[in-house]
Amino acid sequence: MTKSINLVTEVPGPKSRELEAMKNQYVPRAMSIHAPVYVERAEGALLEDVDGNTFIDLAGGVGVMNVGHSQPEIVEAIKEHVERFTHTDFTVVPYDSYVKLAERLAKILPGDTPKKVAFFNSGAEAVENAVKIAKAYTKKSGIITFENAFHGRTMMAMTLTSKVKPYKQGFGPFASNVYRIPYAYCYRCPLNLEYPSCDIKCADELKEAFLHTVAPEDTAAVIVEPVQGEGGFIVPPKEYLKRLQEIAHENDVLLIVDEVQTGFARTGYMFASEYSDIEPDIIVLAKSIAAGMPLSGVAGKAHVMDGPGDSGIGGTYVGNPVACTASLKVIDIIEREQLVDRSKELGKRAYDRFKAMQEKYDIIGDVRGLGSMVGIELVKDRQTKEPAAQETNRILKKAFEKGVISLKAGIYGNVIRVLSPLTITEEQLDEALDVIEEAIKEVLNEK
């Protein structure tokens, strides 16, 4: 059987090293590189670098390439649109791809309440605007977020984000009226309980926050990831988000669900909110919305989205016409190729393989995931659950040198995550997981 990985030079190769030296001279050091091979072309779940090496991509541009790299229909749609026009600013001279995409999303988002959609450039920008919309609608200023959360790197988004290094250190002071409560991290339960006998007590922390931290009369919204991404691929119990929403609504507080990483078939649902059987008041979209074109969205119940006044939200480049066209094709492909079902199949394959590894290697403390959003948490000791962050780095480095690009996550930097394109073949996925297992064995043998 022909393998997909093909390494013809050392990794990184000479051309990539030359470009890396140029990068170090002219690009700020804060833009650190995880896999220092410079891409020449990409297709499906494979990347080829400037030295001719071919890698299996389990990172997917950090969850952006759900429909695969260089999907021909999307490439053709982009080319066709670029030849017509590239920009007008929708609020100056509007265009059809924006309103057609808004209509398409409004019809497939969770719940039956009429929806409206606004588009932006990045996930962080969408988060910022979701908060603005919630504040405008409720006429309140407080926002409640969660431990381990990640919502982006701009001012409000960075404030909402939990992890201090590298995202927040040195960048304060942060936005005011933001409050943090525990998340349903069952492997490391913040309340030292066990599911399901816990009766989802962690959701009741929202009630406690309303008593001890911020009054609901001063709180506009709770913002939550249905599966925490950067926080470590933490999947809460199915009933967790519904309970949060019940508590929020009992107190006239909105629920914003950040689906930047979980949306567009990643979790085995078109949107992960469906797993929890909820209809968010506001939902934040980005990443795989447009196959790598810069686009994000804020969608929500129509009466909530109409909260801001005339020109209260917007921006020069938001809802770029070419990106909106790409997004329409993304939705077509997800539906036609049944990538929601494909996500479940691939996710189960990865999950089962990781569970088999867990039986053999004590370093794997937990295996978790929803659909194709699968991760393993590495620990030095299964009893103490001491994070194995250094070992995680070494495993990922070895896997990279063997031809697999994957990423870490988690507040402790000890989770290996799978965000491969949903077009990856079973053979490619198995080959990549073989490499990860080989890297785990090598690191353990070094001790």
Image: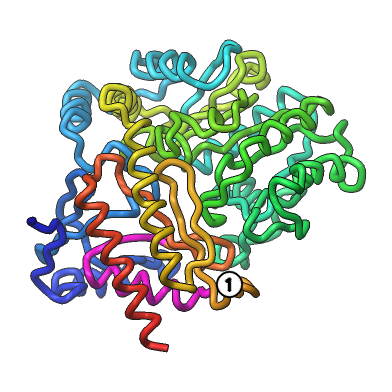
Q: The N terminus appears in which quarter of the rendering? A: bottom left
Identity of the residue furthest to the right in this view: 211
The residue closer to the viewer here, 315 or 251, is 251
Q: Position of residue 429 (x, y in %)?
A: 26, 52
Q: Is residue 211 left or right of residue 313?
A: right
Identity of the residue furthest to the bottom in this view: 447
**The stretch drawn in magenta includes residue 401:** yes
Quarter holding residue 344: top left
Magenta stretch: helix, strand or loop mostly: helix
> Residue at point 65% right, 24% down?
281
Residue wearing tag 1: 382
- Magenta-tinted stretch: 388-407
Residue type for callout 1: Arg
Q: Is residue 138 left or right of residue 185?
A: right
**The stretch drawn in magenta includes residue 255:** no
Q: Secondary structure at mark 1?
A: loop
Q: Position of residue 120 (x, y in %)?
A: 47, 32
